[in-house]
Amino acid sequence: DDTPDALARWTAEGRRVAIFSSGSREAQQLIYKYSDKGDLTGYLSAYFDPTSAMAPKQEASAYVQIALSLGIQPSEGHFCTDILGEAKAAREAGWKATL
C-alpha cells in the first residue's frame, strides 16, 4: 500500500527510480502499468533484467553494468531488495543496499 506514496516522494525529491527484476523488462513495464495501485510507470526511469544487466541479480557485475547504464557511480546507487544475496552483490559493486 505504501509503494505509490514512496515512489511519488522519491521522484519529488529528484531521485531516479529504476527496477531490476528477474522478469523481462517488458513484463516489468506491464506489471507497473497495470498494478492494483494504478499506473506507476511515470515514477520509473529505467527497467533492468539479467539480460540487460549482463549478469544474474546475485553477481556484482550486474550492478556495475546498471550504474554504467544509468550514468552514475555505484556509490550513488541505492538498491532495495528482499534477497540477501542480491544485497551482498550490490554492496560488493559499491552500491548502498537495503534488505
Image: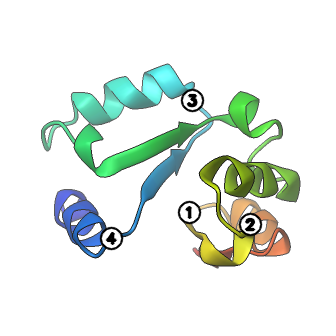
Which dot, 4 or 2, sits closer to the camera?
4
Label pair 3/2, CB-CB below 8 angstroms: no
Give the left or right position of residue 6, taking residue 75 as reference.
left
Q: CA distance from mark 1 to mark 3?
A: 15 Å
Give the residue number, with chain letter if any, for mark 2: 90
Mark 4 or 1 closer to N-term? 4
SS under mark 2? helix
Give the residue number, with chain letter if any, for mark 1: 81
Q: CA distance from mark 4 to mark 2?
A: 22 Å
Front residue (pair 84, 19): 19
Q: Amino acid at mark 2?
A: Ala
> Does residue 40 lie above or below 31 as drawn?
below
- Which residue is found at the position 53% from the left and 27% from the top? 25
Residue 40 image point, x, y percent: 23, 43
Give the residue number, with chain letter if any, for mark 3: 23
The label number, if any, that marks residue 14 in the structure image: 4
> Does residue 24 lie above or below 10 as drawn?
above
Residue 51 image point, x, y percent: 74, 28
Q: CA distance from mark 3 to mark 2?
A: 18 Å
Q: CA distance from mark 4 to mark 1?
A: 21 Å
